[in-house]
Image (tube, rainbow, N blue to C red):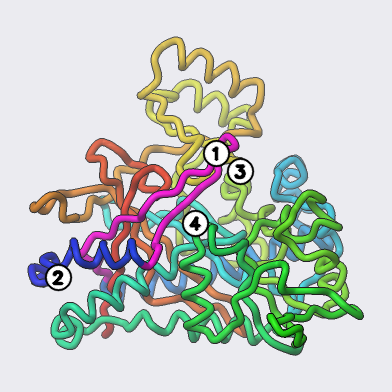
Amino acid sequence: MNYENLMTHSEEINELLARYGVKFGIYKNNEFKEQLFPFDMIPRVIGGEEFDTLEKGLKQRVMALNLFIKDIYEDKKIIKDGVIPEEFVYAGSGFLVECDGVTPPKGIYSHISGIDLVQGKNGEWYVLEDNLRIPSGASYPMIARELCRKCNPKIYAETQIEDNRNYAKLLRRTMDYVNTGGHTVILSPGRYNAAYFEHSYLAEKTGAHLATGTELIVENDHLYFQDYSGNKERVGAVYRRISDEYLDPMTFNKESVIGIPHIYDIYRKGNVALINAPGNGVADDKGIYYFVPKMVKYYLGEDAILQNAPTYLPFYEEDMKYVLENFDNLVLKDVAEAGGYGVVFGSKLTREEKEKFIAMLKNEPRRFIAQEVIDFMDIDIWDEGKIVPRKADLRAFVLMADEPLVWKSGLTRFSRNPDSFIVNSSQGGGFKDTWVLSR
């Protein structure tokens, strides 16, 4: 495919994205870092048949993860049957005791799942992470393709690409399916949040109300949206873009000023849907990730279509021995970290750093997982006037309504550093559109 014409618009597109506020931010060590999310004009292209396999595997994985969360907060059979040690469930920061015994509308927990994958040089896809709390990023390829289509409509007319504009339709279908009666709102911390562009963009595309906590009130066991004139309208579904701990100061963090007092009380009663459900973090803990293929077998009676990266749990004596013997060939990840933080390549440590880390690993084995370093496929990016190879991943989006729905697009993130495997935007990475070829 000839991308030459697209690349001539690179500077123009990135200027427009900056003007729209396409940024990324993360809190780390009590500091907030915000930066622009640079866009690369060369799309990632995935064949239709190849994506069919991905789609089947993604649906299977998300169905199993939803069943796992439901089980953990209800009967806990997977623990009783010895498939997953209870230490891995209850010791993780994602398990919320407040959610125990609470079933969301239609029994769906992860309505929007962001599954991060990489493709090995052998062509096989591996899952690196399951993001089930507040996965972000769908709006970036949506707006980027919208702008690129205006720059060069011909290439999109002549190439058989799945249209990614249907994400809003899939999201609306998902929200409507669990709505308990009333309007749907997207709950944002406010216009100064780094992801505010996404909140407002998705609200516009889905027709949902964009609201902050001050515009939503609980009265008579129901949730209401109150406009600037004081008019109230009932709300039946909240796509919340704030973390669990800030959602309701009466239940979680009492110092939260961006949440809605008593919303969790009416959620318990089934009077409002929360998208995604609080407590989902129990399933996207990096330690729990190790067990997802076992979940697929346990709940669905099937072998996992998509494989994890080869992973070891130092929690187990046998795995700890393997990690210590092969330390220099592994990547170690802190299960509580995100955004590319807490990732350590054994080969990059000095002797002193290695000794210090191993001592910490032995002292806190539940805190870390170890993985083989996958030599994943390079993809082309446009860098200072030339095409160069860089490492990249793919965040695929799976929505759960009356059935699992896989968006035939996705967020491809790439490293701008030629020596780095870390593609996270918080680590200086960029993004590109993902073209799924139609058949």
User: Where 295 sits versus 166, above or below?
Assistant: above
Q: Nearer the viewer, residue 52 or 135?
A: 135
Q: How many residues crowd around disc 2 within 10 Å: few (fewer than 14), some, or many (20 or more)?
A: some
Instruction: Find residue 143 and report its horizontal and vertical position in percent.
Output: 35, 73
Neighbourhood count class around disc 1 (C-alpha, 10 Å): few under 14, some 14–19, many 20 upward:
few
Where does label 3 land, which residue? Answer: 287
Give neighbour class at mark 3: few <14, some 14-19, many 20+ (Cα, 10 Å).
Answer: many
Question: Residue 261: x percent and y percent?
Answer: 82, 64
| Sooner in the amino-acid sequence: mark 1 or mark 4 | 1
Q: Is residue 30 on the magenta stretch?
A: yes
Kindly report which numbered mark, 3 or 1, lies closer to the viewer in this rendering. Answer: 1
Disc 3 residue type? Gly
Rounded to the nearest angstrom, the CA distance separating label 4 from label 3 is 28 Å
Image quarter of residue 260: bottom right
Q: Write down the residue under mark 1.
A: 31
Q: What type of secondary structure mainly makes up the magenta span? A: strand
Q: What residue is disc 2 on? A: 6
Is 18 on the left or on the right of 380, as rendered?
Answer: right
Please tell me which residue is depicted at 64% across the width and 78% down the height of the picture: 185
Task: Please state which amino acid type lies under the numbered disc 1.
Answer: Glu
Q: Is residue 321 above or below residue 230?
A: above
Q: Tell me what residue is drawn at x 75 percent, y 53 percent.
A: 256
The answer to whether 199 is drawn above or below residue 116 in the figure is: below
Q: Amino acid at mark 4?
A: Ala
45 or 216, nearer to the observer: 216
Mark 4 or 3, nearer chain start? 4
Task: Determine if the magenta segment contains residue 194.
Answer: no
Numbered range of the magenta stretch: 20-46
Q: Earlier in the sequence, mark 3 or mark 2?
A: 2
C-alpha span from label 1 to label 4: 13 Å
CA–CA distance in space, label 2 to label 4: 27 Å
Q: Which residue is mark 4?
A: 194
